[in-house]
Amino acid sequence: MRIMIVGAGIGGTILANRLARLLAPELQRGEVDVVVLSASPRHLYQPGLLHLALGQTTVDALYRDQRTLLDPRIALLIDEVVAFAPDSKQVRGASGNAYSYDWLVIATGSRVTPEEVPGLAENAHGFYTEAAALRLAQALQAFDGGRVVVTTGVPHKCPMAPLELTFLLQDLFVRRGIAPRVDLLYTYPIGRLHSIEAVAEWARIEFARRGVRSATYFNIASVNGATRTVHSEEGLSVDYDLLIAIPPHRGAEAIERSGLGPRGWVPTHRRLLSMQGRDDVFVLGDTTNLSVSKAGSTARFQAEVIAANLASRVRGGGDTHGYDGKVLCFIETSRDRATYAAFNYAEPPRPHAPSRAIHMAKTFYHRLYWSSLRGFP
């Protein structure tokens, strides 16, 4: 019996390692194989890209060899998935190989698509890839004053990223002594500063205290690089000297190509995390179409549920766990202060005042990230 996990980000890696422990007897007897199919032999610590852009870390610190992060009992295959064929229980790779499975977990994450907005890819900076983060780092080093506009496309992963970016930019400008020469403008697509009301109200107070300006109901429509102007769907135009964007995201191309879900988001059971209409396919992390945050903690909590239910099913049992929508997101507000938002399907978050203690907890998590991939509680 083969369990195939497509995608080796935080969710896929934790899930594989938890399954290796839960199904240790079956793996030992050769009754079960756990296989991870990854497009890359390297694992990227994605939250570190923002810190790379801000000059707070290095490229080498963001990567590890994927094989070293997996239990030795797990098979790792390097091949980019190009198509899913659930009716025949197969996954096809870019190599031309077809991989069969009995149980499938799709953990292919999300991708940025700045090309969906005219002018955005050519004129805006970002930090969701290594190359983009390095370009932004250079732009920030050269920046000495003017208007900085932060704009947000939807949907996007890491729900707190627009706020965290803005807070850390403001802190950077203060530390460099150029804050009096900087007009920092935060824009957001809806009528408040964040999709979660409690977070939006907390951010409103923080922005007012720091002198950060904002514009809501700002859905980015296009960017004119010649005039350095960003235009919204609502008809507002804003000039900029430095434009930093959270680009819109889509799911994996292979999902769209295979017709598994619009824009690459797979329809998913909100508690069991199985693909709608298929009991032999699970969906993990950013790949789902669930109305929960696309964040690393989301994938971690979901991996625990899928691991428990898969282990039970392999042994002939039923589902024993359900995902409750749990998410925990840290929000760094400066180099030495942070807060967090913890919530689930039933309970909204209530952000605390930023503190050094919470910042230390976030820093501790950064350092423990590689160990946490082992999937220990």
Image: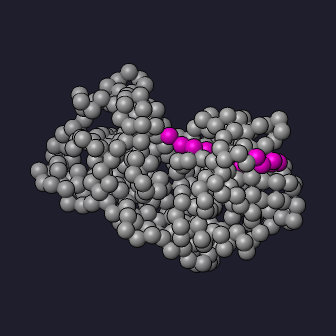
Where are the magenta residues, as a range?
237-250
All told, the count of numbered labels is 0
Q: Measured from the top left, where is residue 83 in percent x and y?
A: 37, 28
Question: Is 203 placed above or below 109 here?
Answer: below
The quadrant of the rendering that contains the N terminus is top left
Q: Measured from the top left, where is residue 60 in percent x and y?
A: 61, 48
Q: Is residue 19 visible?
A: yes
Which of 74 and 203 lies nearest the eye of the viewer?
Answer: 203
**Which residue sits furthest front?**
235
Colour scheme shown? one colour
Q: Measured from the top left, where is residue 90 in percent x and y?
A: 28, 30
Q: Main secondary structure of the magenta part?
A: strand
Residue 44 belongs to magenta span = no
Question: Is 21 placed above or below 101 here?
Answer: below
Residue lying at 31% horizontally and 25% vertically, measured from the top left: 98
Q: Is residue 57 visible?
A: no
Q: Measured from the top left, where is residue 122 in percent x and y?
A: 72, 35
Horizontal side, residue 98 vs residue 232: left or right: left
Residue lying at 25% horizontally and 57% vertically, measured from the top left: 308
The quadrant of the rendering that contains the C terminus is bottom left
Which of 61 and 238 lies nearest the eye of the viewer?
Answer: 238
Horizontal side, residue 159 vs residue 246: left or right: left
Residue 243 belongs to magenta span = yes
Question: Is 74 placed above or below 191 here?
Answer: above
Residue lying at 65% horizontally and 44% vertically, measured from the top left: 233
**Which residue sits furthest left?**
316
Residue lying at 27% horizontally and 60% vertically, measured from the top left: 322
